[in-house]
Amino acid sequence: YRNSDLFIIASRYEPFGLTTMEAMACGTIPIVSSVAGSREIIVDGLNGFIVDTHDRKSLARTIEKALTDSILRKKVAENAAFTIKEHYSWDKTVEKFLAVYKKLL
């Protein structure tokens, strides 16, 4: 992922997968379809892009925008990596599990 500018999932059905998170952790910008499960962690235009599943032109425009606007690309890539670090790192995951276990005890 580190050598890529974009990570694109344009499928018509995609459950939440780790591949989007792996790409984001490397600072690779995710572009996902509106049905992809990973849209739950992406804020469109902030830490990635969400496109209409059935709109090929929208996908093409989004790819072009992400590749040609270097300032936007840098900002979104940084935000993608930050999102994973702050909310989905192993340390954060352990903290969340411990909090649940403590509530159950």
Image (cartoon, rainbow, N blue to C red):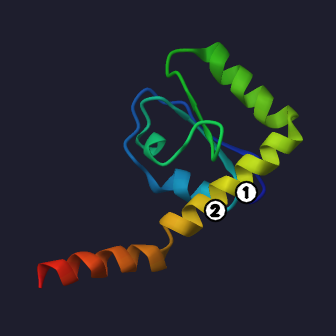
Q: Secondary structure at mark 2?
A: helix
* 96 to the left or right of 49: left
Disc marking residue 78:
1
Question: Which residue is depicted at the point 69% across and 52% down?
Answer: 28
Counting from the top left corner in percent of width and height, residue 43 is at: 55, 42
- Number of residues whose C-alpha sits closer than 10 Å to that of mark 1, classed few (under 14), some (14–19) or many (20 or more): some
Nearest to the observer: residue 31 or residue 19: 31
Which residue is painted at 74% across and 60% down in the image? 2
Q: Amino acid at mark 2?
A: Phe
- Which quadrant of the rendered structure holds the N terminus? bottom right
| 81 on left or right of 71 | left
Residue occupying the point 70% across, 27% down? 62
Q: CA distance from mark 1 to mark 2?
A: 6 Å
Label 1 amino acid?
Glu
Expressed as whole percent of the image width and height from the top left, the position of residue 5 reads 77, 47
Q: Are marks 1 and 2 in contact (CB under 8 Å)?
A: yes
Mark 2 lies on residue: 82
